Image: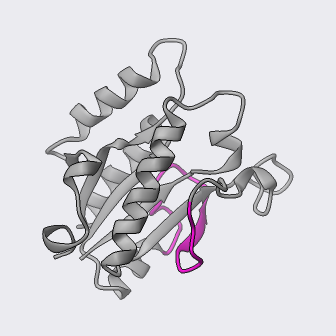
Amino acid sequence: MYALLILDMQVGLVQGPDKPWQAQALISTLNSLMSDARQSHTPIFLARHTGPAGSPIEPGSPLTQIVQELELRGNEVIFNKSRPSAFFMTELAQQLHARGCTGIVVTGMKTQYCVDSTCRAAKDLGFDAVLIADGHTCSDTPLLTARQIVAHHNATLAEPFCRVILAKEWSFQGTGSD
């Protein structure tokens, strides 16, 4: 069984000064994945990146709130993380095991930090990781466009760390949730 993991789709990142590439398309993709996950009773986890007390992204800050465009139903598990990997110093691995999950579908932000780190950590922890190729994004950097960063990580992470699959080719129902 797989779980859906959505990383850092929070106000401060999605609506911040460095606009992520294709954010609205990503939100639509995530809403479709959540709908599919709900239909097959797949657990949905959302991670929020938080900083220390007094920082703009301290726990409880409006900047750490999940963007309203994501269609949450209240049965999702929302947790805070303070490092790029969603597994580091969180109970994500234990919660996945408790639900019988052997795999995780990784989506969200930011490609070169949290998405990358979480895919690598999932594999190290024995989870089958699936990265949705069109289910993650970031912002342009001085050296690379977001499109280049996403393409690079899809190519780099594929095979040694995860399977990379387009959203339209993934389903939690049938083969995806087995």
Q: Is residue 152 visible?
A: yes
In the displayed structure image, the side of residue 42 where residue 51 appears, left or right: right
Q: Nearer the viewer, residue 109 or 143?
A: 109
Residue 134 is left or right of residue 61, and the answer is: left
Q: Residue at x 30, y 48 (%)?
A: 132
Q: Residue furthest right?
A: 54
Name which residue lies at 42% across and 65% down: 34
The answer to whether residue 140 is left or right of residue 156 is right
The answer to which quarter of the image holds residue 111 is top left
Read off the magenta span. 71-91
For the residue pair 51 and 136, the one nearer the viewer reads as 136
Question: Quadrant of the rendered structure where residue 81 is?
Answer: bottom right
**Which is more toward the observer, 177 or 110?**
177
- Residue 25 x %, y %: 46, 39
In the image shown, does 48 or 137 lie closer to the viewer? 137
Question: Where is residue 113 shown, x and y percent of the image?
Answer: 47, 40
Whether 62 is among the magenta residues is no
Give the image location of residue 145, x and y in percent: 45, 17
